[in-house]
Image (tube, rainbow, N blue to C red):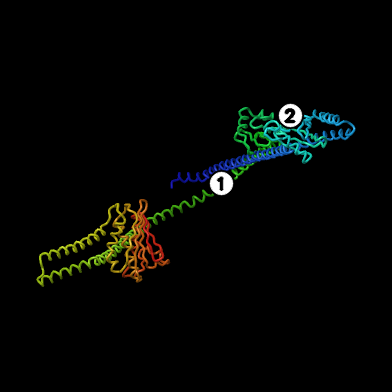
Amino acid sequence: MKINEKRVISYLIVVVPLALVLTASFFITTFYIDKVNAYFKAVKEISIAEHIESKKAKSEIWVDQLNLLFDYKTNRLVDNIKTELKSSVDTAYDSARYIYEKYDGKRPIIEIKERVIDSQMAFNTSKNPIFMASFNGDNILPRSPELSQKNIIAYADANHRAVILEEIQKVRKHQEGFLKSDLYEKNQSYITYVKNLNIYNYYIGSSTNIEAKRYSLKSELLEMLKSIPMDRADFMGLYDGNNPIFLSKKMEEYLGDDLLKNICESLSKEPKWNKDTLDNFHYYSKYYEPLNWYLVYGFETSKMSKQELQKQNKLEKMLDDELEFILSASAAIVIFVVILSLLLSRKINHIFLEYQDEVQTRADELERLNQSLEQRVSDGLRAQRQKDKMLIQQSKMAEMGDMLSMIAHQWRQPLNQMSYLIMNIDSAYEYKELTKEYLDEKLVEANGILEFMSVTIDDFRNYFRPDKSKEFVLVSDVVNTSVALMQKSLELSGIELELDTQGRDLTHIYKNEFIQVMLNLIKNAKDILVEKEIKNPKITIKTRCQKEKLVVEVCDNAGGIDEAIKEKIFEPYFSTKDKHNGTGLGLYMSKMIIEEHLGGSLSVSNHEDGACFRIEI
């Protein structure tokens, strides 16, 4: 290492830690300040949210209390009317009875009647005028201009009810009572109280228009609402249907015509809060059905109570104090760390110079070790390649032996037929029966046998020809080719073969390599069936060929694979057969072909009767 480089390194040992400390302090302080600001901002937002929720809760309670008051007043309306009517009629009744009892037997009946009528007329100046009629319907003291005729017994109200007859029946049967009817107009209900005078078949009564009383009640409640005090940020409105009948001064000041129109259009019979209709305002609306009123109560979110403002100011002061503390603490920490860093840097620089030579020495040793390691790795790779070549060669030799055995099975019957054919020709010649036609027939038969044997040799030769490229084939045809190569061997072993093929889609594969895998799986199934001497041995091959997926299953009924060795059967040189019948390479090579050459998977599982090998591509 050059002298200048050593000086640069020594300089960096001192400067770099200082720079890192300052940079880290800056980012940590900035990060912490941001966190504190975010925290106080969140606290402030929570405080504002709590303020809003508190105001909303208070507003809902206030509106609910007003609705309770409305309910009380409305529910008491009819009772108050009845009490008022009864009081008026009872007073008139007492007056009439007093006159009658005072002058009965002392004055003529006509004079007594006139005095009684005069006493009742004195009550007609009140808000609930008294009327008087007889049981025959004679209109002694008319109740209104609409009912001023002499006899009113046939009068019917707006709903065609004989209300005068109902009054007479009521006083005759019960002496007194209340009736409700649309006395003059529809939807203009009247409550009438009648009472039997028990003199001269007279009865008296009084009627009141319920709608007029309800209107008076509305006016009374409206005046009460106008007098209710509110917080400085609150506003209130009252709507009769969609018509505003009262808007507080603050509501008119805060909101313009457009916003008031939005409130009117958003009124709903379901109680709800509205915050999207108005900016910086929340308002609550609730419908009171008996009076057809909508009560609106809201507040401005930007205005807070004195307590809330004090809370916000306290939070801001805490934030300022916290920031001041952070900056002071950060400055003290930076100064301390800088001094400590300078001391440590000098110590590290000294150690660095001491160990520099030792590092160089070890670097030289490491370089020499790397050179020797490269040589050992190269030797190991060469040995592994040689081992793979031997493995492949051994697999090929094993397959060659199997193929020769299958060719022998395929040719045995044709050779027997050829021998039998030659014996037939020789016998025909010996017994002078050899004719031209007989000889031609036997020659044709011999050519057929020779052609079958030639096709068999071509099939096996095509199988051993290496695939240079993939081709589109019907998998069912490839499976049939594989089965044909093993057919005679399976028949000699008495093994039943079942094919189940579904789908006619083409598959892009290496044909001969796939045949090699199928032959390995069929041969393994045959060997285990023969070895275990299974009764009714059977091999089932299922093919499912679709555009996106190819599935082939080769299953047997040999009882399955032991779970202890199921994970090892695809390893090289692992075999359940004896040394003379198995090399342990068939399944290993099959898995390598399916997964590395064809991009699929080969797996095994046990089912009810035996093992099942599954190919997915």
- The residue that appears at 53% across and 44% down in the rendered structure is 20
Q: In this view of the protein, which residue sits in the foreground, 287 or 213?
A: 213
- Mark 2: which secondary structure? helix
Residue on which the image places disc 1:
341
- In the picture, the disc for residue 147 is 2
How far apart are the two marked residues, 2 and 1, measured between alpha carbons?
112 Å
The amino acid beneath tag 1 is Ser
Question: Which of disc 1 and disc 2 is earlier in sequence?
Answer: 2
- Mark 1: which secondary structure? helix
Q: Work out whether 42 lies above or below 521.
A: above
Q: In this view of the protein, which residue sits in the foreground, 85 or 115?
A: 115
Q: Position of residue 474 (x, y in %)?
A: 30, 54
The amino acid beneath tag 2 is Leu
Q: Position of residue 6 (x, y in %)?
A: 47, 46
- The residue that appears at 48% across and 45% down in the rendered structure is 9
Q: Is residue 342 left or right of residue 6?
A: right
Query: Can you tell which quarter of the image residue 588 is in?
Result: bottom left
Quadrant (top left/top right/bottom left/bottom right) for the C terminus:
bottom left
Q: Work out whether 223 lies above or below 1.
A: above
